[in-house]
Image (cartoon, rainbow, N blue to C red):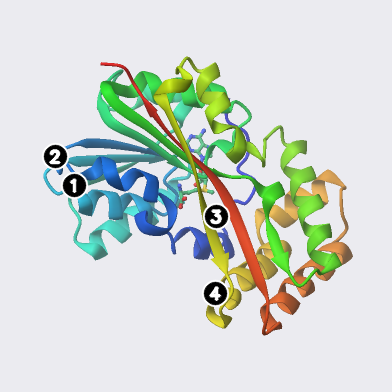
Amino acid sequence: MSGPYLHGHHASVLRSHSWRTVENSCPHVIPYLSDASITILDIGCGPGTITVDLASRVPQGSVLAIDPSADVIEKARKHAEEKGITNVRFEVGDVFEWQKLEGVKEGAFDIVHAHQVLQHLQDPLGALKAMKRLTKPGGIVAIRDVDFANTNWYPELPGLRKWLDLYLAVARSLGCDPTIGKKLHAVAMDAGFARADIEASIGTWLFSTPDERAFWCGLWADRTTQSDFRDRVLESGLATEKDLQEISATWRELEQKGDGWLSVLHGQVICYVKP
Ligand SMILES: C[S@@+](CC[C@H](N)C(=O)[O-])C[C@H]1O[C@@H](n2cnc3c(N)ncnc32)[C@H](O)[C@@H]1O
């Protein structure tokens, strides 16, 4: 089951996605890339910067990446072209409809990967079960997702507390779980993985230097007032345009604070598919 993607693909959203690399967004996968001839499936690839980085690390292998947004898939293809990476294929596709995709078969991939996708799905368990089916015996399912409730910042700014409460409420109103990062191992167990076959870890993003704050706070200031997130908030009735303007101004305030600091916590799992 696939609902609307909360953020959409406004420029303020893509600014965040396009900054992502293997190093900053899936370091838990790096130890599994030593065989350069493996096959990888990247689910919900967005504009594909993580995907292309993965492909560059397995030059004798191949990467297939899917996302339901045709616009973002076009951007991902362009990114691969600009980087000169040719062992990657981007296709419009939905994890719940993988049977429709050419070259996607049960047990076909050494690594099935998803970064920040399960938090946006109404049926994360169904997605994880599909990812398990698509993985070769002896391969891995690798997932990383946010626990938004564990977002932390300094100094304390009431507007950011308001942002976090609103974000959690809107995501939940769409039937999604914005705290799924801390439950990935539990979802994997529900999908049939034994606890002993799941390696759980955490990964963080920190935005503290002036440049880092300008990047993160700036994109959230814009996202709050311009992206699909704004529209979803207004549709839900959980906040008004005025509330959103205030939240956006608080993001700008954190950006301007010389001692400002904000961290984003992710849960990460590597799930081993038994040979
Ligand atoms: C937060 S973005 C993450 C993009 C990318 N993985 C990254 O981290 O840069 C979530 C992506 O999941 C995609 N998505 C939403 N529902 C999906 C589904 N049912 N199957 C596959 N991808 C989906 C969205 O279109 C969006 O591009």
Q: State the residue at coordinates (29%, 20%).
A: 105
Decide: few, some or many residues near mark 4? Use Cα within 10 Å; few <14, some 14-19, many ≥20: some
Q: Which of the image's four quarters has the N terminus?
A: top right
Q: Which residue is mark 3?
A: 9
Q: State the residue at coordinates (16%, 40%).
A: 35
Q: Name the kind of residue labelled 4 in the image.
A: Glu
Tag 3, which secondary structure?
Answer: loop
Q: Which residue is mark 1?
A: 58
Check whether the beta carbons of the residues at disc 4 and disc 3 lie within 8 A of each other: no
Check whether the beta carbons of the residues at disc 3 and disc 2 lie within 8 A of each other: no
Q: Nearer the viewer, residue 71 or 148?
A: 148
> Is label 3 within 8 A of ligand 1 (CB to nearest ligand atom)?
yes
Give the CA distance from mark 4 to mark 2. 35 Å
Q: Residue furthest left?
A: 60
Give the CA distance from mark 3 to mark 2. 32 Å
Q: Name the kind of residue labelled 1 in the image.
A: Val
Q: Position of residue 234 (x, y in %)?
A: 82, 52
Q: Position of residue 103 (x, y in %)?
A: 25, 27
Tag 2, which secondary structure?
Answer: loop
Check whether the beta carbons of the residues at disc 4 and disc 2 lie within 8 A of each other: no
Q: Which residue is mark 2?
A: 37
Check whether the beta carbons of the residues at disc 2 and disc 1 lie within 8 A of each other: yes
Q: State the residue at coordinates (60%, 32%).
A: 183
